[in-house]
């Protein structure tokens, strides 16, 4: 019923993206043209573009899903994602634009004069973007699964192919106009269904969320189990079952007794209205007070919640400045002051957007307890409109949300893949169109393969890790590089290696299941709380120990960072630009690729 | 950098940039010299800018850090309701953003004024 509309909506988003990109390519044919165009990009449009590239699967699906599962404390992710732009605004935006560096490796090399540092920064770009790309692919898998059924990996492969082909053919550049369009599409695709749901749903009053446990099905509820689950039934109930329950193949009504039962993958259970929802074996079941607590419950457990909350705040607030695919956008500002205004607008746009996931989380808890049972809370944004409305309206709302979600994956993953392919081809594979295309294909294939294996991890948690690594590496590099004269390349390199490896190892250990309780779970699951200070300390002390490695013209570099454009000499010095820079078009694609 | 006497002749290919129409300021050149005075000017500019940044960051950090802390010290906060909605939902679901946006707006204005003053200071000398 909803499938044709959803297919159409996803196709329309992809085609519009391709059309605007193609037009954009004609406008921005050479770097010089791009520069002229960049000077004409108004701050508000530019801010829309940054927000469009920034709001990924995590913001569109993940926050609502995680807040529904682990409580309102998970909304700190959203607060951190937005507040990160305040730090970026006051500490990074204007100086970085004035310095004229286009990517973080450019900044590292330009500011500290070290090719080794540049290579390390390139490696970290690949790691951060890689961690960030996985949840986008997972989100696409989820979206197609909700719309069409079937296994999750299909969507992963579909998005992987679209983005890889799009980038490798040079047909999907991160043009400002496309990304700006994607922001407005995303906020519309959440706001209209949210308004509709709040007005139309006959949900219990929102206030009741802090009252009795909400795990009761208000209406006849169909639950599909894409993965096997263990359910604990608290009161025996007659369900309609299609599939396998406790090893028996069923097709019709069956009485499920109190106790623990195994539901096999692919089974569908239909619960009658008024029945109490079963508990899922390893999924948290929070009381109302735990759910409304403003603290992060890692995995749904109240486990050193203050440290976990501060950990995620530190990661998101400081990680936002270290996202390679976002920083690239600041180059399209006219000057430092324009960069500041743009960033302030981004803060406004994000603040408006992040009201919506909270609405979906609350409605999901009240209206869709079935998602707790099937372990699919990440899909709450996609499922709710389909639950609330039937017929044409349901199809239209479902298609709108799916389109917005797909816009989120497309914009963010194309930005990420461009950054990764640009970094890989520029610094490792050799320059030129062919190297760029080859890099894009290699990365696309590898990431799609990895994307199939992350199905069990929450979207938002994956993105949180990308932020934790960014906060432990590029954040100290940028902050100290901009504000501290005595930073040396040896100090910066040591800090990058220490912070990057510590946070990556912590994240990988958590992924493979080390440290599930107590302090290890917090320190490995939210590593930013110790790896960020570690990276800062390493950079400061190593730099103080190696004063001879200081660049000779450090004053010139600080001037390039901080002097307002109006008081610069007529011919500004740009010592930071590597000689081949001028031939590198801004989106990371070699100039010739755009000229065909 | 400062030229004395008549400027060298040159072929005009495009409209002159505005910056080159202004007389070069000797103080600006001081900035570009690696002597103590130039460094002093740069340091004072950086200090002033960092001051404005910190004036925004400190309230922002307080704003973010205080609510989780209060929730640990006063666990009953989670039950607190305003207009029938949980307080957490009101704060984290939207209430925290307006002050952050206002802080950002205020920073942009302060930073632009600071730079204006710095530019005027260089012109005066």
Image: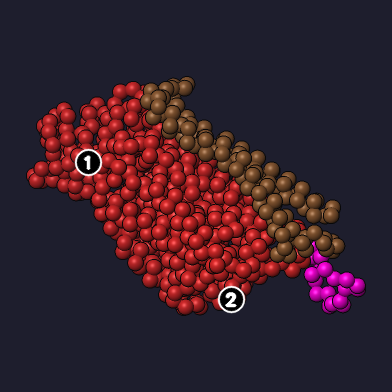
Chain colours: A red, B brown
Corner quadrant of residue A218 = top left
- Neighbour tally class for label 1: few under 14, some 14-19, many 20 plus, Cα within 10 Å: few
What mark, if any, has residue A466 been given in the picture? none
Relative to A464, is A156 above or below? below
Name the residue rendered at 44%, 49% in the picture: A533
Name the residue rendered at 17%, 35% in the picture: A232
- Which is the main secondary structure of the residues drawn in magenta? loop
Q: Find residue A378 and report its horizontal and vertical position in percent.
A: 34, 44
Which residue is label 1 attached to?
Answer: A282
Q: Of discs 1 and 2, which sits in the foreground?
A: 2
Which quarter of the figure is the C terminus of chain A placed in? Answer: bottom right
Q: Is residue A127 left or right of residue A51?
A: left
Asked if badge 1 and badge 2 are on a common chain, one would say yes
Q: Find residue B93 and report its horizontal and vertical position in percent.
A: 47, 34
Q: Could you tell me which chain the residue with mark 1 belongs to?
A: A
Q: Find residue B32 and report its horizontal and vertical position in percent.
A: 73, 64
Query: Which residues, given as a range, are shown in magenta?
Result: B1-20
Question: Which comes sooner in the sequence, label 1 or label 2?
Answer: 1
Farthest-out residue, right: B6
- Neighbour tally class for label 2: few under 14, some 14-19, many 20 plus, Cα within 10 Å: few
Q: How many marks?
A: 2
Which residue is label 2 attached to?
Answer: A580
């Amino acid at each position: 019923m909803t499938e044709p509309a959803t297919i159409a909506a996803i196709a329309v988003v992809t085609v519009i993206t391709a059309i605007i990109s193609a037009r954009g390519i004609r406008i921005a044919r050479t770097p010089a043209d791009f520069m002229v165009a960049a000077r004409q990009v108004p701050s508000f449009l530019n801010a829309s573009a940054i927000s469009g590239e920034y709001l990924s699967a995590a913001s569109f699906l993940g926050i609502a899903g995680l807040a529904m599962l682990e409580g309102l404390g998970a909304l700190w992710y959203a607060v951190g994602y937005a507040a990160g732009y305040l730090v970026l605004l006051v500490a990074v935006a204007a100086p970085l634009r004035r310095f004229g560096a286009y990517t973080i490796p450019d900044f590292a090399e330009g500011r500290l004069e070290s090719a080794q540092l540049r290579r390390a920064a390139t490696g970290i770009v690949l790691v951060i973007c890689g961690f960030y790309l996985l949840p986008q692919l997972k989100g696409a898998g989820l979206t197609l699964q909700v719309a069409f059924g079937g296994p999750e990996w299909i969507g992963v492969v579909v998005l992987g192919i679209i983005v890889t082909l799009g980038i490798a053919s040079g047909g999907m550049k991160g043009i400002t106009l496309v990304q700006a369009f994607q922001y407005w599409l995303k906020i519309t695709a959440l706001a209209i269904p949210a308004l509709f749901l709040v007005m139309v749903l006959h949900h219990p009053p929102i206030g009741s969320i802090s009252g009795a446990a909400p795990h009761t099905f208000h209406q006849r509820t169909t639950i599909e189990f894409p993965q096997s689950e263990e359910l604990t039934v608290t009161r025996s109930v007659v369900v309609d079952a299609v599939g396998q329950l406790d090893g028996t193949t069923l097709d019709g009504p069956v009485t499920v007794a109190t106790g623990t039962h195994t539901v096999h993958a692919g089974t569908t259970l239909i619960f009658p209205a008024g029945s109490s929802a079963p508990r899922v074996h390893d999924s948290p079941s929070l009381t109302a007070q735990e759910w409304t607590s403003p603290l992060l419950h890692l995995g749904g457990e109240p486990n050193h919640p203050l440290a976990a909350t501060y950990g995620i705040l530190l990661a998101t607030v400081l990680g936002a400045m270290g996202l390679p695919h976002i920083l690239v956008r600041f180059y399209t500002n006219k000057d430092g002051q324009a960069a500041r205004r743009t960033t302030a607008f981004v803060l406004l746009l994000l603040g408006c957007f992040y009201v919506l996931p909270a609405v979906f989380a609350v409605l999901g808890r009240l209206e869709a307890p079935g998602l707790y049972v099937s372990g699919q809370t990440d899909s709450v944004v996609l499922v709710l409109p389909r639950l609330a409305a039937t017929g044409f309206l349901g199809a239209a709302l479902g298609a709108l949300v799916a389109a917005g979600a797909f816009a989120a994956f497309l914009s963010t993953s194309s930005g990420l893949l461009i950054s990764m392919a640009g970094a890989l081809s520029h610094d490792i594979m050799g320059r030129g169109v062919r190297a760029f295309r080859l890099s894009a294909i290699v990365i696309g294939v590898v990431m799609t393969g990895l994307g199939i294996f992350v199905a069990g991890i929450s979207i938002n948690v994956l993105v949180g890790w990308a932020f934790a690594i960014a906060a432990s590496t590029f954040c100290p590099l940028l902050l100290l590089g901009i504000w501290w004269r005595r930073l040396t390349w040896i100090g910066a390199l040591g800090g990058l290696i220490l912070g990057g490896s510590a946070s990556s190892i912590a994240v990988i250990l958590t992924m493979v299941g080390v440290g599930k309780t107590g302090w290890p779970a917090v320190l490995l699951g939210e590593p930013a709380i110790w790896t960020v200070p570690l990276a800062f300390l390493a950079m400061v002390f190593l730099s103080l120990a190696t004063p001879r490695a200081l660049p000779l013209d450090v004053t010139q570099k600080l001037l390039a960072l901080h002097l307002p454009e109006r008081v610069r000499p007529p011919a500004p010095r740009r010592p930071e630009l590597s000689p081949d820079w001028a031939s590198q078009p801004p989106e990371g694609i070699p100039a010739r690729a755009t000229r065909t | 950098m400062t030229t004395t006497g008549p400027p060298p002749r040159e072929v005009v290919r495009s409209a002159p940039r505005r910056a080159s129409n202004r007389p070069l300021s000797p103080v600006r050149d001081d900035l570009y010299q690696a002597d103590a005075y130039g460094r002093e000017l740069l340091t004072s500019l950086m200090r002033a800018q960092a001051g404005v940044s910190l004036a925004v960051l400190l309230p922002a950090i307080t704003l973010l850090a205080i609510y989780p802390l209060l929730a640990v010290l006063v666990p009953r906060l989670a039950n607190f309701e305003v207009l029938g909605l949980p307080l957490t939902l009101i704060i984290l679901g939207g209430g925290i953003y307006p002050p952050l946006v206002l802080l950002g707006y205020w920073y942009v204005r302060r930073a632009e004024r600071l730079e204006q003053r710095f530019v005027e200071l260089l012109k005066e000398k």
